[in-house]
Image (tube, rainbow, N blue to C red):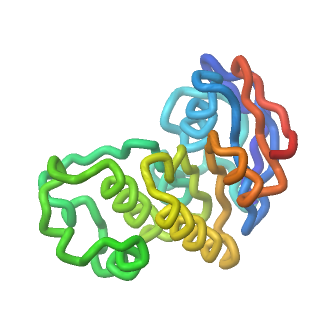
Amino acid sequence: MLSVRELQRSGLGPAAFELADGECVVVQGASGSGKTLLLRAIADLDPNQGQLLLDGQSRETLSGPQWRRQVIYLPTDSGWWSERVRDHFADWSAAVPLLARLRLPPAIGERLTPGLSTGERQRLALARALALQPRVLLLDEPTSGLDPEMVAAVEDIIGERLRAGMSALWITHDPAQARRLSRRCLWVADGGVRETVP
């Protein structure tokens, strides 16, 4: 379980909620309301205050990299630091089965990242994150550049991981997707966070 207590940072007021094992909670709100700031604060990517616990263990007892190996933030447009695709994966063989389900051939590992489409980058970034077996996945509009068939594939894969115990916070602007994903919603407005239903 992820417990968030009085989490705040510049542009984001205090947020408090719990995310149970195997649960997905959607995050919604207008563009610029602070949704991404919330996920980045939980991942400890920006200066913030408050208490976060994962399975009762405080974030403060772990180094930043240790925390972020368990609580992974997947931005809308992930970073690519090397020219070859497979160089971005800690274990390429662990990602290959995920790539197949996302309609990406194993040979894509030899391609150069500048030549990838937006949809290919999004699917590769998702496979890269899932291959690390996170406890909590923080998803920032992971299907925004995908067609309906691929959206369904991503939702299926995440659903399987949720049933296996992973938890997720998922930013989406799609009301239908929000209703498919969760019965709980964190609504972000003017930096404030309140719980509602999607």
Q: Is residue 62 above or below residue 153?
A: above
| Image location of residue 48, percent across then percent down | 60, 28
| Residue name at image x 71 percent, y 32 percent | 7
| Image location of residue 150, percent across then percent down | 47, 64
The quarter of the rendered structure image containing the N terminus is: bottom right
Which of the 4 image quadrants contains residue 146? bottom left
The front one of 160 and 51 is 160
| Residue name at image x 71 percent, y 17 percent | 190
| Residue name at image x 57 percent, y 57 percent | 137
- Residue at far right of view: 196
Horizontal side of residue 73 vs 177, given as left or right: left
Q: Is residue 190 above or below residue 111?
A: above
The front one of 180 and 164 is 180
Q: Count up the numbered dots.
A: 0
Which of the 4 image quadrants contains residue 175? top right
Horizontal side of residue 82 vs 127, given as left or right: left
| Image location of residue 103, percent across then percent down | 36, 73
Which of the 4 image quadrants contains residue 182? bottom right
| Image location of residue 18, percent across then percent down | 80, 50
- Residue at far front of view: 148
Q: Is residue 48 above or below residue 11?
A: below
Horizontal side of residue 62 vs 85, given as left or right: right
